[in-house]
Image (cartoon, helix red, strand yellow):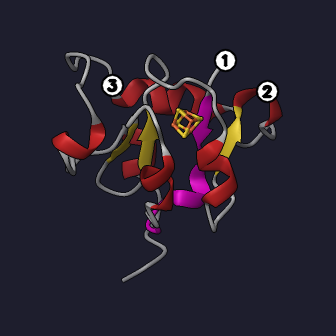
Amino acid sequence: MTFVVTQACVDVQDKSCTQVCPADCIYEGGRMMYINPDQCIDCGACEEVCPMSAIRYDGDLTDADLQFVDINAEFFDGMETPKGARKLGRIDRDVPFVASLPRTTD
Ligand code: SF4
């Protein structure tokens, strides 16, 4: 079980979550943030601060957002286990589903 960033983050990336994550496991992609499920310690701090209510416990996801469990995990496929999001910085790519979404901002 893990916390998951959902579609409400796309093209917003407020990043308040990264300031409170004790595991430093919320990574910045091109259009949204992604939580590394192998590093998340399920503390819930990120869910409380997200102004978009984009972060949910995977057991509380709506049917529409369930796919984001796999989408968050997919972002880290093929990557060496990152040492921490703040040090790594922005990773200018997204998983294909997110990259294909229509832009909601200019
Ligand atoms: Fe980080 Fe806690 Fe959110 Fe997991 S639940 S991503 S450890 S703030």
Residue 6 as seen in the image, left or right of residue 103: right
Can you tell which mark lies on residue 1?
1
Q: Secondary structure at mark 2?
A: helix
Task: Give yes or no for contact between labels 1 and 2 (Cβ–Cβ under 8 Å).
Answer: yes
Q: Amino acid at mark 2?
A: Gly
Q: Earlier in the sequence, mark 2 or mark 3?
A: 2
Can you tell which mark lies on residue 67?
none
Residue shown at 55% from the left, 23% from the top: 41
Residue 80 as seen in the image, left or right of residue 39: left
Q: Earlier in the sequence, mark 1 or mark 2?
A: 1
Label 2: how many Cα within 10 Å (few below 14, some 14–19, many 20+)? few
Magenta region: which residues?
A: 3-12
Quarter of the figure that contains the C terminus: bottom left
Residue at image mark 2 = 59
User: Of all residues shown, which one is farthest toward the bottom?
Assistant: 106
Of residues 55 and 70, which is closer to you in this image? 55
Residue at image mark 3 = 76
- Which quadrant would residue 78 be assigned to in this image? top left
Q: Is residue 10 magenta?
A: yes
Residue 25 as seen in the image, left or right of residue 48: left
- Which quadrant would residue 69 be assigned to in this image? top right
Height in image: 101 above or below 86?
Answer: below
Between the C-alphas of marks 2 and 3, the distance is: 21 Å
Q: Amino acid at mark 3?
A: Phe
Horizontal and vertical percent position of residue 55: 63, 47
